[in-house]
């Protein structure tokens, strides 16, 4: 305890770049508050989403203002992003936090950290970045740009820390907060005796969690549903998990294709019990493919983007590493269709192959699930617990 019971004021600034960053930040804040236990008068500031705000973070900007995906989006909004970056730098320097934590938003976070350190007002506060860029999938030498910028990078992907350490960048892997929480929920559901026989087959389509992903991926998924439904007499009910802000748009698109009786829009976490019982999934590549693999649901990974973004990706990206479950286990278990190959004809064929030899693919994904669980759960202490201990060291 501090002398004379006088509590020191400490300030933490957290930047979340998107929905998953908001989730990571809110859970981390809870753990920091728990471990601090009144030792400091602690104030949180940040670039936030709704979850961070509910934890009492003073918001200086909503993360939607910096959340742009792909080369063309960034170029088209470059001036706005630059202006917001400069405004944010001024605000952070005025706040003068003891610790600055950035989550995801890789390009923006790197520019922010470099600019802060160049400023003559920079007061040597500690810099932490969570979710470093997946540059092991494209142009690994770009790791050098991150050298010496942050005091520590915190990876949430197994073995990624080893990649950055090759470039002498201080990196730690404490586990994966999203999937630790996800697996805890699975364990609770597994304790319930809810696995009953179903009258109908349920499958999944996941067009992505960002506006641009939905724009490019939804159409091909709806066309694929029509082709698959026309191929089988058995009634297939399709679940489409999405975020609240996209439900109206997706519902309108479903209506255009007259698929209201075939597709149910659901919330992923609230409908986890139904999702667990699904037979096959077609999912936009990203976090969801890892969740589906942990559930042992045979999954086809897809990704469509603009012509220019797709062209750049084909030049720079190592597609063997782009699907997270495949990268983590070092095997191509999930098939992946990108851009032109991601069409309803190819998806229909691939779905039928899995559907008609289901036990074979289910067994493959059961093995994948077991391997992923052993690799993701790094230790018994948990991501938030270990990272909070590091933050408290920085604060003191």
Image (cartoon, rainbow, N blue to C red):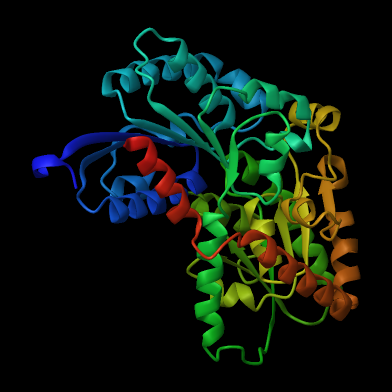
Where residue 128 sits in the image (x, y, percent)?
48, 34
Quadrant of residue 95 within the rendered picture = top left
Instruction: For residue 279, say whether it is visible.
Output: yes
**Vertical relation: 34 (above or below) 91:** below
Residue that appears at 34% across and 15% down: 90
Residue that appears at 66% across and 42% down: 161
Residue lying farthest to the front in this orientation: 3
Residue that appears at 66% across and 52% down: 207
Left or right, 138 with respect to 49, comes to right
Instruction: For residue 266, say whether it is visible.
Output: no
Residue that appears at 41% across and 9% down: 119
Where residue 273 sits in the image (x, y, percent)?
55, 77
Q: Quadrant of the C terminus?
A: top left
Residue 250 or residue 186, whichever sits in front: 186
Residue 244 or residue 273, whichever sits in front: 273
**Vertical relation: 226 (above or below) 391:** below
Where residue 135 sits in the image (x, y, percent)?
72, 33
**Vertical relation: 328 (above or below) 59:** below
**Vertical relation: 373 (above or below) 33:** below
Quadrant of residue 363 within the rendered picture = bottom right
> How many numbered marks, from 0 up?
0
Where residue 390 sits in the image (x, y, percent)?
43, 43
Residue lying farthest to the left in this orientation: 4
């Amino acid at each position: 305890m501090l002398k004379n019971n006088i509590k020191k004021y400490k300030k933490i600034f957290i930047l979340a770049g998107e929905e998953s960053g908001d989730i990571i930040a809110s859970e981390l804040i809870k753990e920091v508050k728990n471990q601090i236990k009144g030792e400091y008068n602690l104030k949180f500031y940040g670039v936030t989403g709704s979850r961070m705000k509910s934890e009492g973070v003073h918001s200086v900007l909503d993360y939607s203002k910096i959340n742009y995906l792909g080369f063309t989006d960034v170029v088209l909004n470059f001036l706005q992003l630059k202006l917001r970056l400069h405004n944010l730098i001024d605000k952070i320097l005025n706040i003068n936090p003891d610790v600055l934590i950035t989550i995801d938003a890789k390009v923006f976070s790197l520019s922010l950290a470099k600019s802060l350190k160049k400023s003559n007002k920079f007061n040597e506060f500690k810099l932490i970045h969570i979710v470093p860029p997946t540059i092991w999938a494209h142009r690994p030498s770009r790791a050098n740009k991150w050298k010496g910028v942050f005091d520590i990078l915190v990876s949430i992907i197994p073995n990624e820390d080893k990649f950055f350490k090759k470039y002498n960048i201080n990196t730690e892997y404490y586990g994966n907060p999203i999937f630790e929480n996800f697996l805890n929920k699975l364990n609770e559901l597994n304790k319930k005796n809810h696995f009953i026989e179903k009258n109908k087959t349920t499958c999944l389509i996941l067009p992505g969690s960002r506006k641009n992903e939905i724009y490019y991926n939804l159409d091909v998924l709806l066309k694929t549903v029509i082709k698959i439904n026309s191929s089988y007499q058995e009634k297939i009910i399709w679940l489409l998990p999405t975020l609240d802000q996209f439900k109206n748009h997706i519902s309108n698109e479903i209506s255009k294709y007259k698929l209201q009786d075939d597709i149910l829009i659901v919330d992923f976490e609230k409908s986890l019990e139904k999702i667990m019982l699904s037979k096959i999934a077609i999912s936009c590549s990203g976090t969801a493919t890892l969740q589906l693999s942990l559930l042992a649901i045979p999954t086809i990974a897809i990704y469509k983007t603009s012509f220019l973004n797709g062209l750049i990706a084909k030049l720079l990206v190592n597609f063997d590493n782009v699907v997270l479950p495949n990268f983590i286990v070092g095997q191509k278990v999930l098939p992946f269709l990108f851009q032109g190959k991601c069409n309803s004809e190819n998806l229909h064929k691939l779905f039928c192959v899995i559907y008609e030899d289901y036990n074979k693919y289910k067994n493959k994904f059961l093995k994948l699930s077991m391997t992923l669980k052993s690799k993701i759960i790094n230790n018994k202490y948990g991501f938030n617990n270990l990272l909070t201990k590091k933050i408290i060291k920085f604060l003191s």
